[in-house]
Image: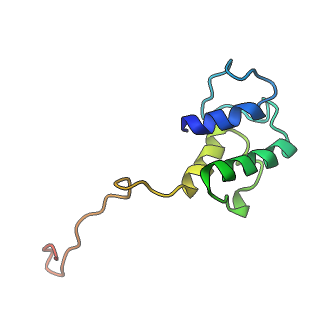
Amino acid sequence: MDARFTALLRPFLKHTGPDDLALTPDTDLRALGVDSMQAIELLFAVEDSYGITLPDEELNDTTFATAGSLWRVIAAQLPAEAGDGPVTAPATGADGGATA
């Protein structure tokens, strides 16, 4: 979770003050007041803030259950930063040697 996400999330947590709770991946969003209407508003705020669109199949109660579950769906839609892509082994030829 990044600082922008936690700052974006705080106003939607009606059962806590703006700074009196450390948000962790296990933070229960429902227990802190995120109801179905707020989840929709939160969805729009996330999509606007990050410039992404969350897939329809991820718009469910499980996604909005905890801060971590929501963050995982958001992070999956973010473009990979340069140098953060998967590490791959060099291609090898039929004889096991590296190819150019």
Question: x and y percent of residue 78 in the render?
Answer: 54, 55
The residue lying furthest to the bottom in this view is 94
Q: How many marks?
A: 0
**Residue placed at 55% from the left, 50% from the top?**
75
Residue 71 falls in which quadrant of the image?
top right
Q: Which residue is at a point 70% across and 48% down the rendered structure image? A: 63
Above or below residue 9? Residue 44 is below
> Measured along the vertical axis of the image, is residue 20 above or below residue 25?
above
Residue occupying the far top of the picture: 20
30 relative position to 2: left or right: right
Q: Which of 6 and 93 is in front in this view?
A: 6
- Res 20 quadrant in image: top right
User: 35 and 2: which one is in front?
Assistant: 2
Q: Where is residue 27 in the image (x, y as percent from the top left)?
A: 67, 31
Where does the N terminus fall, quadrant-wise? Answer: top right
* Residue 49 screen position, x and y as percent: 64, 48
Residue 7 in picture, x, y percent from top left? 64, 33
Residue drawn at x 20%, y 74% is: 92
Is 55 on the left or on the right of 99, as rendered?
right
Q: Is residue 26 placed above or below 76 in the rendered structure?
A: above
12 with respect to 79 (left or right): right
On-image quarter of the C terminus? bottom left
How is this picture coloured?
A: rainbow
Q: What residue is at 74 percent from the left and 35 percent from the top?
A: 29
